[in-house]
Amino acid sequence: MHIENIIRKLDLVTLTIFQSVCDEKSLSKAAEKNMIALSAASKRLTDLEHLIGTKLFIRDGKGMQITPAGESLLYHCRTILDSVYKASVELEEYKIGIKGFVRLQANLSTIIQFLPESLHPFIVENPQIKIELEERPSIEIIQNVSNKIADLGICIAENLSEDLDYYHYRSDRLVAVIQNQQYLSGQKIISFEDALDYDFIGLHTQSAINRILQQKSEALGKQLKLRILVTSFDAVCRMVQAGMGIGILPHKVFEIFGKPLGLASVELTDDWAKRDLYLISKRDEFLNPVTLLLKQYFMHPHKEIIPK
């Protein structure tokens, strides 16, 4: 009953004031920011603490110091208010004529290599449909589509979920990216095993590339010598350019970022270096009309607009 009471009585205005107090560390500044009387803001906080049944702040000479319970509420408060803001923006777009909204998540490889040219014709043909594109690791995309946080996903198919549909979207091939041929000191890289003699510039730990490199090095009984971890392909290339190690990237990504920097690439002979990217979604009967339209667009051949 206590939890149900909180759900029933908690309101957005009080949560907004609570967040402002946490940010400003001052009740008076929070009241001024939200254009509410100081006494009214104070009463809302007191009522909130009474509703929850614990202190959210310690009042002292330094202002309002948040308690552990307050920290917990602040985390959820930010999520709630952010969701309300996004919902308001989305609904406002319906009001001004936007007819649909699709939440599309894709891994970094897909966004860099394929999506700009792939999505452009759809955007031109459907100007009243808005696409919210977010970059996420493949493993997170699958979870988000399954949990309805995203409508569609494009990624490496890891940890397949039975409640999702999978359709082949594109393929790419991983290559070793090196500063130049002299960097190898006369040695040759033919397979991933050869590359393990060198330091690596790696992507973040959640990336599909990083995970497969870890798995394959362990299978070979060798250590993957990750010298530096970065969060983007261009950062990998800059570190390689500086001679800090070698990188493993999709070939088209190398063409976009590495080649202009004067870097060289070496094609790996390993079978797993060829990767398949998949479009994933819930079953068609669970998709809204605009999501289904975009899904069908991705599934069928279409003319892409290639930039000059």
Image: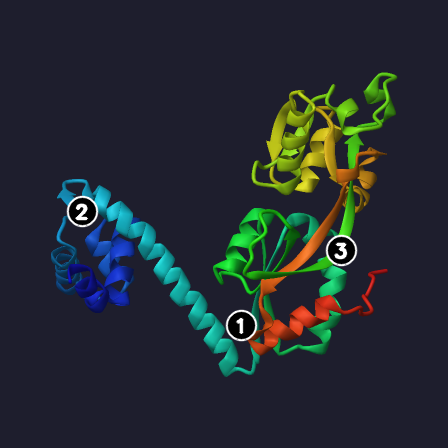
Where residue 68 sits, quadrant-wise, is: top left
SS for tag 2? Answer: strand
How far separated are the C-alphas under marks 1 and 3?
A: 24 Å
- The amino acid sitting under disc 3 is Arg
What residue occupies the far top of the structure in this picture? 185
Sequence-wise first label, 2 or 1: 2
Q: As rendered, which of 53 and 19 lies closer to the eye?
A: 53
Badge number at residue 57? 2
Badge number at residue 37? none
**Camera-side mark, 2 or 3:** 3
Please indicate, yes or no, whether residue 43 appears anywhere in the rendered image. yes
Residue 229 coordinates in the image, percent (x, y): 60, 31
What residue did someone put label 3 on? 170
**Camera-side mark, 2 or 1:** 1
Quadrant showing the N terminus: bottom left
Q: As rendered, which of 307 and 53 lies closer to the eye?
A: 53
How far separated are the C-alphas under marks 2 and 3?
A: 53 Å
SS for tag 1? Answer: helix
Q: As rendered, which of 237 and 249 lies closer to the eye?
A: 249
Relative vertical location of residue 40 with respect to residue 106 in this rendering, above or below: below
* Residue drawn at 36 percent across, 62 percent down: 81
**Camera-side mark, 1 or 3:** 1
Q: As rendered, which of 69 and 268 lies closer to the eye?
A: 268
Total labels drawn = 3
Residue 218 coordinates in the image, percent (x, y): 64, 25
Please indicate, yes or no, whether residue 137 appears anywhere in the rendered image. no
What residue occupies the far front of the structure in this picture? 162
- The amino acid sitting under disc 1 is Phe
